Image (cartoon, grey):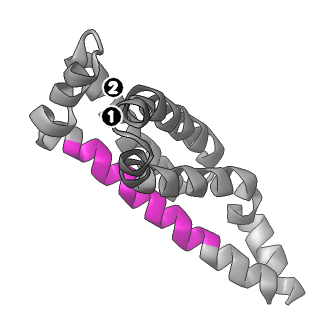
């Protein structure tokens, strides 16, 4: 019973994180001045339109892949790279310029997403159909 509950919980978390990244990717195209090229330009990236399109497209693609599950590990790794880059380029400067509490407030959703991605990477096997069926037969 425990493994089945864990599997169900991790699937729900999988869908939640996919929704977050799908939304974030889509916003880069819907509101480019705020979350897309404008944001990348403000951070200091060269070719902000290119980076916004690339990252937004990858976030949408990886969110879809997370739902499809067989390629989950690849999508999770790509999203972790995106999260690490976002942390280095936006949150570390926030920590040094505005202090810990502004950093903690600004990083709360990123932290949630990063933890979920690590969990998904660690427990990737529970999403595979054969493992789910085997767990159900045991309990």
**Can see residue 136?**
no
Nearer to the camera, 27 or 124: 27
- Image quadrant holding the N terminus, namely bottom right
Percent coordinates x, y for residue 123 in the rendering: 73, 59
Label 2 sits on a secondary structure element that is: helix
Is 85 rendered above or below residue 117? above
Label 1 sits on a secondary structure element that is: helix
Percent coordinates x, y for residue 76 in the rendering: 58, 44
Nearer to the camera, 54 or 116: 116
Checking the image for residue 87, the label placed there is none
Q: What is the spatial separation of the Cα atoms under label 1 and label 2, in whole angstroms?
A: 5 Å
Q: Is residue 20 left or right of residue 38?
A: right
Quadrant hosting residue 31: top left
Residue highlighted by disc 2 = 54
Number of numbered callouts drawn: 2
| Residue 22 magenta-highlighted | yes
- Circles 1, 2 touching at the beta carbon (< 8 Å): yes
In the image, farthest residue toward the right: 138
Q: Which residues are magenta?
A: 10-27
Quadrant hosting residue 11: bottom right
- Image quadrant holding the C terminus, namely bottom right
Q: Residue at x 20, y 32 (%)?
A: 36
| Residue 12 magenta-highlighted | yes
Is 9 rendered above or below residue 63? below
Is 41 rendered above or below residue 129? above
Residue density around tag 2, few if under 14, some if 14–19, many if 20 or more, within 10 Å: few
Q: Residue at x 45, y 65 (%)?
A: 16
Residue highlighted by disc 1 = 57
Nearer to the camera, 58 or 81: 81
């Amino acid at each position: 019973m425990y493994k089945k509950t864990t599997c169900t919980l991790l699937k729900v978390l999988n869908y939640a994180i996919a929704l977050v990244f799908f939304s974030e990717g889509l916003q880069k195209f819907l509101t480019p001045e705020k979350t897309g090229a404008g944001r990348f330009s403000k951070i200091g990236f060269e070719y902000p339109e290119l980076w916004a399109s690339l990252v937004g497209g990858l976030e949408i693609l990886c969110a879809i892949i997370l739902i499809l599950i067989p390629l989950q590990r690849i999508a999770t790794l790509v999203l972790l790279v995106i999260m690490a880059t976002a942390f280095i380029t936006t949150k570390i400067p926030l920590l040094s310029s505005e202090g810990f509490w502004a950093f903690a407030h600004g990083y709360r959703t990123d932290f949630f997403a990063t933890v979920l991605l690590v969990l998904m990477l660690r427990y990737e096997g529970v999403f595979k159909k054969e493992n789910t069926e085997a767990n159900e037969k045991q309990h």
